[in-house]
């Protein structure tokens, strides 16, 4: 870094931003609506998440930092009560503090767009050579731990990866990695991967929090929303993806509005919410498989 400037921001502004701009000009020759998802460079000596450059136009770019559960990834081993806090460069112990640490790190990821760029977690995942002899139980639990922190921060995410030619012998055929949810003959970790999520909703609402627990029979899903502005529309429709993989008999309860339809073919739940007059009021929806 010293060869290029005094700090990471110098390197980003002098080298990365011109690269992003060159790529953006190239791809928009084909379609002016394309958005470039730019990602920060990796500095192995500094694990802090870089903020998006101020120079990037919100109409042309989004921000896509990467993050992994480093201990599980590097050592191909999952322990539910220990992890590495890569921001503080120290171990974390107990399930409670591991979960809190992951939520804090991904909160910083979400905030790294400088309040202007849309942020997506551009890459995350878990290795599947942790315990392939045990039906990938460790990998499934590791993925669930990551996904819980993601959904509690309402982060958009892309999973690394999907390689349909994956086999036990060659893995992903890339740098010795085996992170694909798909193999030639099976899918893996679907219990943790397939999760309820808001599919479409009015811009008048914002997601406060989503929680899903696939580890028990109830498969409890909690969604908390808040209306951020009041328009003339008397009601709003919110579509929620509710995977049949978990819900053979979904039981739904809301504190506001009504759920009028669940289409098993599309796996979409329709939640109709009337106008909320008090913008400080949170509204919730709960789903379990069976009775609450």
Image (cartoon, rainbow, N blue to C red):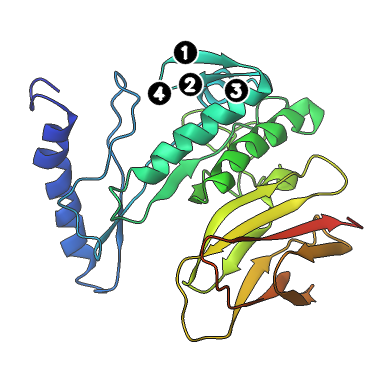
Report the residue marked by disc 1. Answer: 90
Q: Nearer the viewer, residue 248 or 130?
A: 248
Q: Are marks 2 and 4 in contact (CB under 8 Å)?
A: yes
Q: Residues within 10 Å of mark 3 (few under 14, many from 20)?
A: some
Residue denoted by label 2: 85
Give the structural element (helix, strand or loop) at label 2: strand
Residue nearest the viewer, comparing 52 with 205: 205
Q: Are marks 4 and 3 in contact (CB under 8 Å)?
A: no
Q: If you read the primary sequence from the N terminus, does the residue marked by circle 2 or circle 1 appear first?
A: 2
Q: Residue at x 62, y 73 (%)?
A: 238
Residue that numbered label 3 is attached to: 97
**Residue reaching furthest to the front:** 278
- Specify few, some or many for label 1: CA neighbours under 10 Å numbering under 14, 14-19, or 20 or more: few
Image position, residue 146 (x, y; %): 59, 37
Q: Position of residue 191 (x, y in %)?
A: 75, 46
Name the one closer to the observer, 225 or 132.
Answer: 225
Q: Is residue 286 left or right of residue 19?
A: right
Frontmost of labels 3 and 1 is: 3
Which residue is disc 4 drawn over?
A: 87
Q: Position of residue 233 (x, y in %)?
A: 52, 86
Q: In what quadrant of the picture does the C terminus appear?
A: bottom right
Q: Is residue 92 left or right of residue 35?
A: right
- CB atoms of marks 3 and 1 within 8 Å: no
Disc 2 to disc 1, C-alpha distance: 5 Å
Circles 2 and 3: CB atoms closer than 8 Å: no
- Residue 66 appearing in the image: no
Q: CA distance from mark 4 to mark 1?
A: 8 Å
Labels 2 and 3: the sequence-earlier one: 2
């Amino acid at each position: 870094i010293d060869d290029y400037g005094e700090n990471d921001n110098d390197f980003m502004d002098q080298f990365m931003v011109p690269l992003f701009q060159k790529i953006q000009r190239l791809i928009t020759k084909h379609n002016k609506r394309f958005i470039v998802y730019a990602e920060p460079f990796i500095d192995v000596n500094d694990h802090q998440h870089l903020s998006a450059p101020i120079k990037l136009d919100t109409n042309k770019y989004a921000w896509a930092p990467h993050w992994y559960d480093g201990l599980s990834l590097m050592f191909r081993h999952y322990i539910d009560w220990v992890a590495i806090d890569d921001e503080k460069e120290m171990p974390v112990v107990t399930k409670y503090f591991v979960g809190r640490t992951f939520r804090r790190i991904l909160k910083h990821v979400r905030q790294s767009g400088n309040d202007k760029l849309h942020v997506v977690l551009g890459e995350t995942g878990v290795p599947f050579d942790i315990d392939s002899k045990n039906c990938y139980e460790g990998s499934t639990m590791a993925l669930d731990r990551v996904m819980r922190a993601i959904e509690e921060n309402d982060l958009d995410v892309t999973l690394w990866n999907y390689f349909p030619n994956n086999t036990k012998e060659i893995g992903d055929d890339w740098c010795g990695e085996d992170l694909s949810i798909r193999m030639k003959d099976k899918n893996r970790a679907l219990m943790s991967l397939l999760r309820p999520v808001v599919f479409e909703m009015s811009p008048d609402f914002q997601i406060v929090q989503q929680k899903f627990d696939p580890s028990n029979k109830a498969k409890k899903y909690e969604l908390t929303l808040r209306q951020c502005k009041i328009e003339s529309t008397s009601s709003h429709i919110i579509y929620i993806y509710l995977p049949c993989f978990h819900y053979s008999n979904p039981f739904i309860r809301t504190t506001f509005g009504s759920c009028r339809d669940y289409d098993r073919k599309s796996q979409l739940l329709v939640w109709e919410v009337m106008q909320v007059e008090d913008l400080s009021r949170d509204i919730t929806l709960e789903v379990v498989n069976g009775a609450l």
